[in-house]
Amino acid sequence: MSEPRVLKISFVPGVTPGKWIRRWEERMRSVPLEVVPVSEPEQLAKLKALEVELAFVRLPVDKTGLNVIPLYSELPVVVAPKDHEIAVFDEVPVEELAAEYLLQDPELFPEWRDISDEIREGTRKPLPPMASVEESLDLVAAGLGILILPMSVARHFNRKDLRYRPVTGVAESQVGVAWLRPDGPIPDGEGDPVIEEFIGVVRGRSAQSSRQPSIQAKQDAAPKKGRAPKADAASGKPGGKTAGKTAGRSGSGARSARPSSRSGPSKGKGGKGKGRR
């Protein structure tokens, strides 16, 4: 007896898959979900190792061998020590960060790269080793530099020794869902229906959407509704044209066979007359 299907998904910090999990449990109780948190540097590792079937990732990613669908955008924020001057602002233009040391690859933020004082002057130092977001935040708290992160990530790692503010002039980041692309082409309707069902859930399709594989399967299994067969005119079955005409003629014959209302009284009168004589 084969084991029941379990759909395994991973997600990076800042992504909150709770709403999709709830929708899935309401629609597909027969296929439980197993959810695995992963670090952003390793966001594709478990997917490519076949340890999960879908991955919520922070874009951009290398799409080689993958199907990737963008889901939503995220507001960028600058993260600095709690006593940094950004704390007095509601939002910070990226130009105000030109003199700061960014603890990230400048190529990830061309808007900052193009106005950076140290890059223009050629004085930028190599990045220190950082294996995770947590380690990067430790360096920020120590006053070694700043970070630009999605707001969801800054909230996820909320720390009392740090402050974050929205930064303007920097492109928003995106979250997407990724899954492995098969080696060969797949004919329409022959993909993994469980994965297709989950993709429909995260894209906001309703439970009754005809694009959901579960609904398509129900429609295919339902008996086809057709027109009722026409009555055989020659047999005179009810509903046929000949039967209707025959019934009409029979009705007129029945009416003509009834006694005339005039003949009844005349006979009665004759009878009474004979009785009187």
Image (cartoon, grey):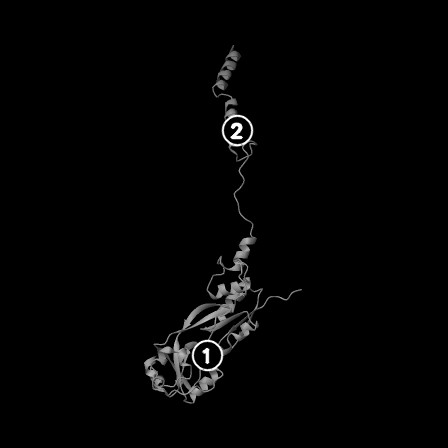
Disc 2 marks a residue whose amino acid type is Thr
Q: Is residue 131 left or right of residue 122?
A: right
Q: CA distance from mark 2 to mark 1?
A: 83 Å
Q: For mark 2, does the 10 Å Cα neighbourhood hold few (<14), some (14 to 19), or many (20 or more) residues?
A: few
> Dot 2: what SS?
helix
Contact (Cβ within 8 Å) of mark 2 with mark 1: no
Query: How many marks can you see?
Result: 2
- Of the numbered discs in the image, which one, if any, rests on residue 246? 2
Q: Give the answer, above or below, for where 240 lies relative to 216.
A: above
Residue nearest the viewer, comparing 208 with 103: 103
Sequence-first tag of 2 and 1: 1
Residue under numbered circle 1: 156
Q: Give the answer, above or below, for where 254 lies relative to 101.
A: above
Q: Is residue 216 left or right of residue 2?
A: left
Looking at the picture, how far across and down is residue 237, in whole percent?
Answer: 56, 34
Who's the residue at 50% across and 66% down the image? Answer: 23
Residue nearest the viewer, comparing 168 with 44: 44
Residue nearest the viewer, comparing 62 with 177: 62
